[in-house]
Amino acid sequence: MITIQQYIDDITDAVTKKIIRYTPQIYRLVEKVKKSSSPYDAIGSAVLIKLNDRYFLITAGHIISENKVGKIGFLEKGTFHILDGHFIYINPDLDTVSKYTDLAICELDFESQEFLTKHFDFIDGAKLNFDYQPKNDKNFLLVGFPWRKTKFNFVKQKFKVIPFKFLTDIYNNNQIGKEIESYRDQCLVLSYPQRQIIDIKTGEKKRAVIPEGLSGCGVWHIPNIFVENIDNAIANLAGIVIRQDEFTKRYIIATRIHIVSEILRLSFDLNLKPSMISRRNGIKANIL
C-alpha cells in the first residue's frame, strides 16, 4: 500500500508530464566569455496556447523588457530558434499596475509556430476557462524551468535540463502587504517558503530551489487531488508566474488567467467573451 505522499507524488508526476508538453524553456544568446561557457543562458519559461487556428506564447513581461527581441528563443536538440512574431508585453517597471500584470504575449510567426509544434503541444484555448476561479486554496502546481537546474556540459556541448514541479497552496492572506492585497483580483499569491521548505522524507527544513526561471510558467490548479485513475486527473490553467517576493522569499506571485484573456481579446482581436471577473472588478481599463 502506498502512502498519501507517494500518491500525491504520483499524481503530480502524471499531471506534470502533460503540462510540460505546453511549457517551453526560454533562452537568450550571450557572448561567450570563455571557451567552456555556453552561448546561451536559460532565462524563463512559457505556456503555449492555440486559439482560432492562431498560435500564441504566453510568458512574463519582464522576460521581454529585460532582453532584446531577436536574441531570445528556444533550444531543442541542439538547435536554437529565435522567437519571433507579434508581441504585446507589459513592462513591470512602468508603474504599480504593470508590476502586478507583467505579462507578455507573442502571436507566433510561421517559423516559430512550426519549430514549437515540432517539439511541443499547444493547449486548445477553446477548452480553457479563462474566468477560472479555484474552489479551494490548495493544490496549485507550478511547472517550469528554474535556470539553476539547467546545467551546461562543455564536453558534450549540451544542456542538462531538469523540469521543476512544486505543489503549493494560496499564501496566508494575513501576511501579505496592503499593496499586494489591492491586486488580489488579478493575482494569485502562492506559498513558496524558499528558506524553509520541509523535506517530506526527513522532516527537516531545507532551502528550496531558487525560482528564477520559473517566470512565465503556468500555475495549474488541481481541483481534486484524489481520483480513482491518476491518468484522469484534471489540472486547470489558473495563472502565469511573474515573480517571487524579493524580501521574505516566502511566496510567488502569478497573474490570473482572466487577465491573459483580456489582453488576447483587446490586443489581438480575438473573438473571446469579455472576462466577467475583470468587468466585475473594474480591471479592464487598467491592464492596457
Image (spheres, rainbow, N blue to C red):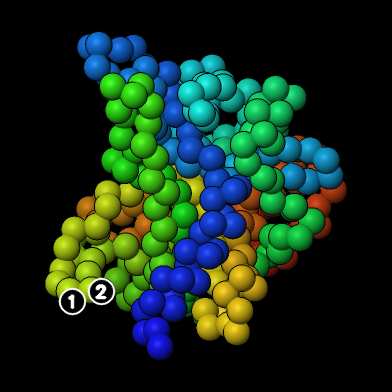
164 or 46, which lies in front?
164
- In which quadrant of the rendered view does residue 146 lie? top left
Question: Could you say where residue 215 lies in the image, as x and y percent from the top left?
Answer: 43, 45
Q: Amino acid at mark 1?
A: Gly
Residue marked by disc 1? 203
Q: Amino acid at mark 2?
A: Ile
Name the element at disc 2: loop
Q: Residues within 10 Å of mark 2 (few under 14, many from 20)?
A: few
- In which quadrant of the rendered view does residue 28 lie? top left
Residue 200 vertical placement versus 26 (above, below): below
Task: Please say whether residue 98 is visible from this viewpoint.
Answer: no
Q: Are marks 2 and 1 in contact (CB under 8 Å)?
A: yes
Name the element at disc 1: loop
Query: Gap in Å between the C-alphas at discs 2 and 1?
Result: 5 Å
Q: Is residue 279 left or right of residue 8?
A: right
Residue 151 vertical placement versus 156 (above, below): below
Q: Is residue 210 left or right of residue 108?
A: left
Q: Is residue 62 left or right of residue 259?
A: left
Residue at x 59%, y 57% (from the top left corner): 18
Q: Residues within 10 Å of mark 1 (few under 14, many from 20)?
A: few
Say which mark, if any, is on residue 200.
Answer: 2
Residue at x 53%, y 83% (from the top left corner): 226
Task: Please say whether residue 80 is visible from this viewpoint.
Answer: yes
